[in-house]
Amino acid sequence: MGNEQKNKNIYPLNVELPSLKSLFIEMYFGEQYLSSGTATLLSNTRESHCTLVTNRHNVTGLHQETGECLSSTLGTPDNIVIHFHRPGDSIGYWKKVKLPLYRGDGSPFWIEHPRLGEKADIVALNLTWGDDVLKLPYYLKLDLDRVGMIVSPAEPISVIGYPFGLSTSGKLPVWATGFLAQELSLISKEEPVFLVDCRTRQGQSGSPVIAFRTTGFRSIKDNRLSTSLSPKIVWEFLGIYSGRVNEKSDLGRVWHVSALEELLDAAERDYEIRQSRLSEH
């Protein structure tokens, strides 16, 4: 069970849907606060398995490449607090849910990438869903979040999260907008990561990255390039942001949606295995 957090404002219906899909998270060692970050939910369809995804370094508390402790306290997290939206007609209410990161035997609750393991800075957490939190995932197999948009280098992309733990109102995220810094066609299965040029900072680790368009977009239809000029707002979910290449650069790494598809499949398999074991007892 979590504590309810209320914001005085009741948000208008024109809050963009991607603003509701980024979740503020806090990492703790016991009751000691260590850091904050961003997470989001992923699902293939409305009926399929839903899991929470963030960066691996958020839950380990260790630098992904050097293994150094990220907190000045030299502590590493053993629990996480997730700020979920509450269900209902009014946006602007959150429920804090606190979850352990380790089982009693010391094994982590999180699920790592099935092929890349600890090399991938993305993990999934399977949750037990109640009707007291709102599930608003990015759908990987629906055109709500993946319209088939072609995104080229130098085109705008947005990293939607919580730089330095900041939010716009209540726990709604900040949109940091930059540019795609490479061709997405260069992404390989061995290294499903691409670069963006965006002024991001700590706290945005785990943020969803999207291409958000209000006037039109390009796609491939019937093996031909097609341009849509529809006034309908659309976006393409591209991946999960994991941090800058170094402190002096605004270039940041994003784990591509293809790697997230594999991670979601692993989370679903893990859930099914554990449910099967429970039914046997």
Image (cartoon, grey):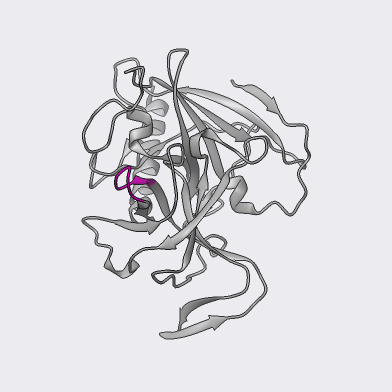
Rendered location of residue 150, percent (x, y): 44, 73
What's the residue at 34%, 46% (across, down)? Answer: 244
Magenta stretch: includes residue 243:
yes
What's the residue at 44%, 35% (across, down)? Answer: 126
The one of 213 and 259 positioned closer to us in this rendering: 213
Residue 222 in view in this figure: no
Quarter of the image for residue 135 reads top right
Q: Quadrant where the N terminus lies?
A: top right
The one of 132 and 277 positioned closer to us in this rendering: 132
Magenta stretch: includes residue 140:
no
Prevailing SS of the magenta stretch: loop
Rendered location of residue 161, percent (x, y): 52, 43
Quarter of the image for residue 125 reads top left
Q: Is residue 41 left or right of residue 92?
A: left
Q: Check the image and name the residue furthest to the top.
A: 31
Rendered location of residue 183, percent (x, y): 33, 69
The one of 16 and 123 positioned closer to us in this rendering: 16
What's the residue at 66%, 32% (across, down)? Answer: 94
In the image, residue 119 sits, relative to residue 99, either above or below, namely: below
Q: Check the image and name the residue furthest to the front.
A: 248
Q: Quadrant where the C terminus lies?
A: top left
Segment colored magenta: 242-249
Rendered location of residue 70, percent (x, y): 33, 28
The one of 51 and 229 positioned closer to us in this rendering: 229
